[in-house]
Structure formats: C-alpha cells, structure tokens
Amino acid sequence: MEPDDLEANLSPSHAPAAMKPETIMACMVAVAVVIAGAFIVFYPQDTLLPTFSVSVDAAAGLDELDGAPAPANATFALTLHGVTRPRLLRTLGICNERGTVAVSYAGAVLAWGRVPKFCVPAQGQEHVKMVALGGDVELSDELRGRLASERRARTAELDVDIMLDRQRYLSCRVKPDVDGPSPCKVFLLD
C-alpha cells in the first residue's frame, strides 16, 4: 500500500463518528431501567415476606414426665414473632385468618392448638400469643426418660410446627428451658 493510499484511508471522512454524550447517557439509563425491571420481576417473593420466630413463654406438665408412666398433659404458652424488615425496593405484609400449632418431641405430638388472627405490616412487626394444650398423650418410657434428662441438662429441643392459611408452613426448633425466640423456617406451599 502506498503512503498516499494510507493517508486517503485515514481522512476525516472515513473516521468513525463519535457518539454524543446525550446518546451515551440515554443508553446507560435504558440499561439501568431494564436491569431494575428484571430485578423486581424475578426477585424471589419469599425474601419480601416477614421472617418468623417462636418463643416458649411457659411450659407446664413436662415435669410430671419424669415420674411414673401416665398420660402427658403438657401445656405451652407460645409467642409467634413476625417481623418484616425494610428492603431496598419493597416488602410485603401478611395477614393470617386461621392456623394451627403443634408442639412435639422426637416425633411425638405433646400439645396442639389454634393460631389467632393476626397481620404483620409491610414494614413492622407483630407478636401473637397462643396456647397449645396436650390431651392425655402416651409416651414410651424411653422418650419420657430422654426428655427428662435433656430438661435437667437444659438441652431439650421441641419442634413447633405452625400451619398458616394452608399457604405457609413454619417449622421451628425451640428450647423450652432457654429464654428468647428461636428462628423458624418458612415454607410456601402451592
């Protein structure tokens, strides 16, 4: 290629056109809007919902399990804590019309009850008191002994399962002899 041809190819009429700053800014805004829209649409719904925990306020009837074999009549005063944390874009509240609660140890249901009506606001919290009552539950000697031993060592763990409106299932593991709420796993049912 000759020097004159090289100069002809580099002339301003053949140079690429520079983009205007307004065009670049408009493209950046369009890309940001598309990404934000996709984030909102495909953001997992369950991360926008409240988180739950359960605390055992009082447990009665568990001490009798250490004695002679007899039907267990345990009673549990529970508090369900629902908290919706502020998120970057939005959060969702939840209302519950009806529900059930069951307290069990090693697969044996000790007590059950109803969950009262409640609402957790979109950016707030709600504390719901409920009672689970046992009704002459028969436990094996092995379970009785194990539960009594774990309670003396303050290591006993109970499962608290809560069904809310046939849509949400809460699975919580609590220590009846330790103060404070225990977190629940939330399962959304279809």
Image (tube, grey):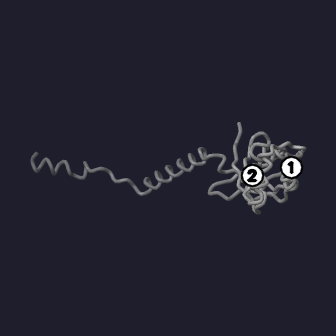
Q: Is residue 112 left or right of residue 7?
A: right
Q: Is residue 22 left or right of residue 15?
A: right
Q: Residues within 10 Å of mark 1 (few under 14, many from 20)?
A: many
Number of numbered discs visible in the structure rendering: 2
Q: Is residue 155 left or right of residue 38?
A: right
CA gap, disc 1 and disc 2:
26 Å
Identity of the amino acid at label 2? Gly
Q: Nearer the viewer, mark 1 or mark 2?
A: 1
Place of residue 81 in the rendered image (x, y in percent of width and height, measured from the top left):
77, 56
- Name the residue beneath numbered marker 1: 132
- Name the residue beneath numbered marker 2: 93
Mark 1 vs 2, N-terminal side: 2
Identity of the amino acid at label 1? Ala
In which quadrant will I find the N terminus? top left
Q: Residue at x 46, y 56 (%)?
A: 25
Q: Nearer the viewer, residue 55 or 116?
A: 55
Q: Is residue 36 left or right of residue 10?
A: right
Q: Is residue 123 visible?
A: no
Q: Is residue 40 visible?
A: yes
Name the outermost residue toward the front: 68
In which quadrant will I find the C terminus? top right
Q: Residues within 10 Å of mark 2 (few under 14, many from 20)?
A: some
Query: Which picture quadrant has residue 127?
Result: bottom right
Disc 2 secondary structure class = loop
Place of residue 99 in the rendered image (x, y in percent of width and height, measured from the top left):
83, 44
